[in-house]
Image: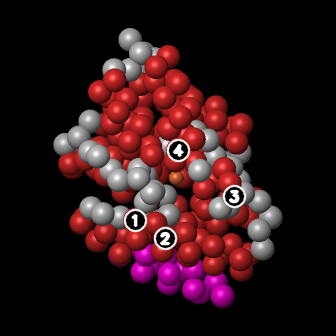
Amino acid sequence: MVSLVKESKRLMKQQTEKNKSPAWLLTEIAVTKGKELSRKYEVSEELVVSSLYLAHLVFDKEFSGRIQRGHTRSSAALARKYLDKWKVSEKKQKIILNAVEAHHDHVPTKSLVAEVVKNADCFKFVTVKGCIIFLHELGLRKTPFKKSVNYVLRKMNQKKKLLTLKDCKREAEKNCRKIIEIFKSFS
Ligand SMILES: [Fe+2]
């Protein structure tokens, strides 16, 4: 029996190197938050963490480009092939694939696992650390500083709106005030 978390992590590492995005440090933020929320909401950490790794198997550096826009569906399609290969049960696959597809706002979540995944993923952009990592990432991609600052703030607002769990909303609200204060001081 393969370890689902280990295999998902290994696969995402491989895909991140190939796609040159998203930044691995951002994936780690989501996974850390996912583990914390799994305990808090008493859902399977295995399903949450593997879904978080599999959610961005297909990705691209081009913001809002075709690949980024379709990454929830295409990552789920690629994840399905591996879940079959790893002989993951149909029941688990259903939950994971919905969590991957529903981690943005286009597809409804069908389980608490998916809800936790969606909220944990947002923390990549509603934490000071995540926003600084993302700003650094934009710099590596030669995005002008001012444009990067505005982009990070836009992304932060976008992700804040996606949050659904009460305590995540509260925590993000506090973080976002701090992020705005820091980033506004850059201009
Ligand atoms: Fe995503």
Q: CA distance from mark 4 to mark 3?
A: 14 Å
Q: Amino acid at mark 2?
A: Gln
On whether ligand 1 comes within 8 Å of the CB at mark 2, the answer is no
Q: CA distance from mark 3 to mark 2?
A: 16 Å
The tag earlier along the polypeptide, 3 or 2, is: 3
Badge 2 element: helix
Crowd tier of the residue under label 4, counting other residues whose Cα lies within 10 Å: few below 14, some 14–19, many 20 or above: many
Quadrant for the C terminus in the image: bottom right
Residue 49, visible in the rendered structure: no
Q: Position of residue 19 (x, y in %)?
A: 70, 42
Q: Which residue is mark 3?
A: 65
Q: CA distance from mark 1 to mark 3?
A: 20 Å
Badge 4 element: helix
Badge 1 element: helix
What residue appears at the point 55 percent right and 40 percent down from the top-left corner? 75
The dominant secondary structure in magenta is helix
Residue 157's place in the image compared with 73, above or below, is below
Q: Nearer the viewer, residue 184 or 74?
A: 74
| Mark identifier at residue 158 | 2
Residue 40, visible in the rendered structure: yes
Residue 70's place in the image compared with 163, above or below, is above
Q: From the image, state whether disc 2 or disc 4 is nearer to you.
A: 4
Q: Amino acid at mark 3?
A: Gly
Q: Position of residue 158 (x, y in %)?
A: 49, 70
Crowd tier of the residue under label 1, counting other residues whose Cα lies within 10 Å: few below 14, some 14–19, many 20 or above: some
